[in-house]
Image (spheres, grey):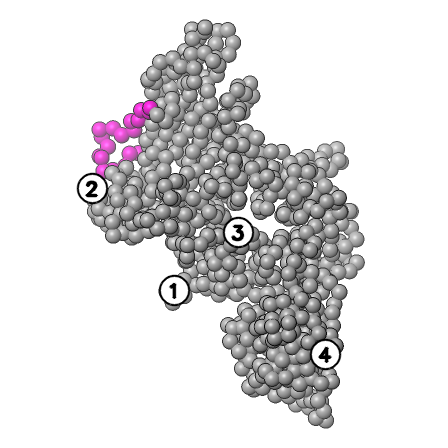
Amino acid sequence: MARSAPAYSSFTAGEIGPKFEGRTNIEKYREGLADLTNMIVMPSGGVTRRPGTEFLDEVKNSAVKTRLIPFQFKASDTYILEFGDQVFRIYRNGALVTSGGVPVEVVTPYVAADIFNLRFVQSADTMYFTHPSYDVRKLTRTDHDAWKFSIPIFQGGLDAAKYIENITQANPGVITVTGHGFSNGNEVSLSGIQGMTEISGANYRVANATTNTFTLVDEAGDNVDTTSFTAFEDGGGTEVAITGATQANPCVITSNSHPFFDNDVIYIKDVAGMTELNDAYYIVASATTNTFALKDMSGTDVDATGYTAYTSGGTAELALSKVQKIQAVGTEMSGTDNRPSVVTFFEQRLVFANTNNNPQTIFFSKNADYQNFETGTADDDALIYTIASNQVNAIRYLSATRILTIGTTGGEYVLTSANDGPITPTATLIRKYSNYGSGNVEPVQVADVTLFLQRGGRKVREFKYVGELNIEAYAAPDMTILAEHLTEGGVVGFAYQQEPESIIWAIRADGTLLGLSYRREEQIVAWHKHIIGGTFSGGQAVVESITTLPTDTGEDELYMIVKRTINGATKRYVERMKVFDFGSDTTTAFFVDSGLTYSGSAVNTLSGLSHLEGESVTVLANGAAHPVRTVSSGAISMAYDTTNAAVGYSYTSSMQTMRLDTGSADGTAQGKPKRIHGLTVRFHETVGAEIGNDSGETDRIPFRSSANPMDQGVPLFSGDKKIEFPGGFQDDDRVYVRQDQALPMTVLALFPRLNTFDI
């Protein structure tokens, strides 16, 4: 009979799948675990319990799926945008932003079914959104409660300019084009209009493709009132307008020759000889009649009563009747099948890609001029690049680091400059480096590495540079090879939490939260799974959306939307994972989900829990585990007075080793009866744990002594706990550790003592 006492002091392989139960010959086997639930792997090698989640608020409409999108204006000024059905709300510092006591809401064009296919990129206080079914949108923030969605004006380059002449205007301001019209889906700009001053931020949106009419509206889609707009006159009183042009309120424009699609946009810009009319644009009112109206940013008609004819000898006045040309711009990025699906920034350029008509094409703006797509040969000109391949490889993502990684349905490409400098229209190269294909999920970037979802939805690959000796090369190894069981069913979203432990969070299709502790420099690639407290329709709670925000406190924040059945109704809550470094004692610990805290004078009733009505909740009171309570009328009654409490759903954290293999007198210990007769567990800042071979039979380790009051917390324990292990000989010997109280647990190492029976 062989005696052994192995040391398990590193768990940096994370949870390993059952298919690797036979690979006792590899180092990852000793560093792996058969189960790692609601715990994360630390860079030091140990595992620690994940913090609980703090309840922030219910989403605006729990009946529809909702998405969280981060908005970081600066390190100390960050927001979470809660996108629902055609509206979003704003969270700042964990609370809804309000105005006059009412949550601020911003109307969007995106229905609930489309919000998870939105792609976005941010620069300072501006964010661009793309979706194949919507025109590109621009979101700008000027204050915590001041947000504006608009349709940006892109300058030329994406298609040949189309000019429409012989325009007439008639009440209510309809402009009619004879001899020239619009094609369905065109976006046009009133550019270089003689005899008019600039109308800043104005654009036309096609209302009716059948009658070629559209209405002048502002960037928010509101009508602009032009009641007082009259003809331009020169010094002699002669009207300077194109033949047959007339104009009247509310400036509806009609194009008889070229039809529009409903909601197409036509822009007014650079109008010479007219005073400025801020934030006005035309929006399509009717695709049947091709009419549109001038509105302000709030959607109301613009009152232009005070505007009169322009005279060269007097004050410059606004006169819309002097339109001589309408220039079509941006038609590659507007209208049906021409809207980009992907967006990023790269080398001071705004980059779009993948329209339905051009799925392999990438559009780069001019350098540092994000809405200018005028192509040319100068180094700072815009450029258009189409990937050449023998099959259609639709672009799924653009990941900008030192290079631009391009993920397509058929493989992974790298875009660089031909001369090792910045990209230019004449010095740009795209090379293919792998053929795995990418899923339709935004990747994550860690340092200069891009981690992306493979096309099948189950494998996460790491696209990284592996070149040496002046040979440029990239590889995409599989990060899920040891834990493929965890991603079974598919991954639908990622978020990266850099601090404090460098974790890539992922949502599985069934709503399970997965984590990947990822520190390549220390060779740590460790998966773990997380079951959020509560239930939905009798099963586990469902995580539907995740995102992260950096903070000035040193820890990035993980936000999530969790769907549960509560008091018989479906509820979707916005929640935030609490900090890992909770403090130096258990009174500030937070290991409950959808929880809230109390701190104040001694009380025996805790209220404000209406979001958990009818639910059984776990309570940590004064740092000590408290009996379970049920929420009634939004409150619970305590067994004793408390000054500090955390209340929410309980969850269990657990770890279990792989089958122990410590050798025997004649070789391997695998397949031989073994008995663990003792175990030493090295803990760090822990209170409470259970130990056994598996979850079916465990013994609780004592941490409380007779000197500790029952209604007060136990001091955090760091050190060794020695346990006598029950049970006899068995072939499948493992060590199982569990924590189901609302208290912290960190396991640094396991030192089992066992006998192996040689037969």
Residue 324 visible in the snapshot = no
Q: Pick whichever of labels 4 and 3 is earlier in the sequence.
A: 3
| Mark before the other along the chain sequence, 3 or 1 | 1
N-terminal-most mark, 2 or 4: 4
**Type of amino acid under label 4:** Thr
Q: Nearer the viewer, mark 3 or mark 2?
A: 3
Residue at the (65%, 74%) spot, across then down: 212
Q: Is residue 290 left or right of residue 71?
A: right
Residue 533, given in percent of the width and then of the height, sits at 37, 41
Q: Is residue 59 above or below residue 241?
A: above
Mark 1, residue position: 102
Quarter occupied by residue 322: bottom right
State the separation of the CA atoms marked 4 and 3: 43 Å
Q: Is residue 431 left or right of residue 520?
A: right
From the viewer's side, name the closer residue of 476 and 392.
392
Q: Is residue 474 above or below residue 91?
A: above
Kindly identify which residue carries mark 4.
178
**Magenta segment:** 697-721
Q: CA distance from mark 3 to mark 1?
A: 26 Å
Name the mark nearer the viewer: 4 or 1: 4
Per the image, label 4 sits on a secondary structure element best described as loop
Q: Which residue is mark 3?
A: 116
Of circles 2 and 4, the one toward us is: 4
The residue wearing badge 2 is 639
Residue 225 lies left or right of residue 407; in this view the side is left
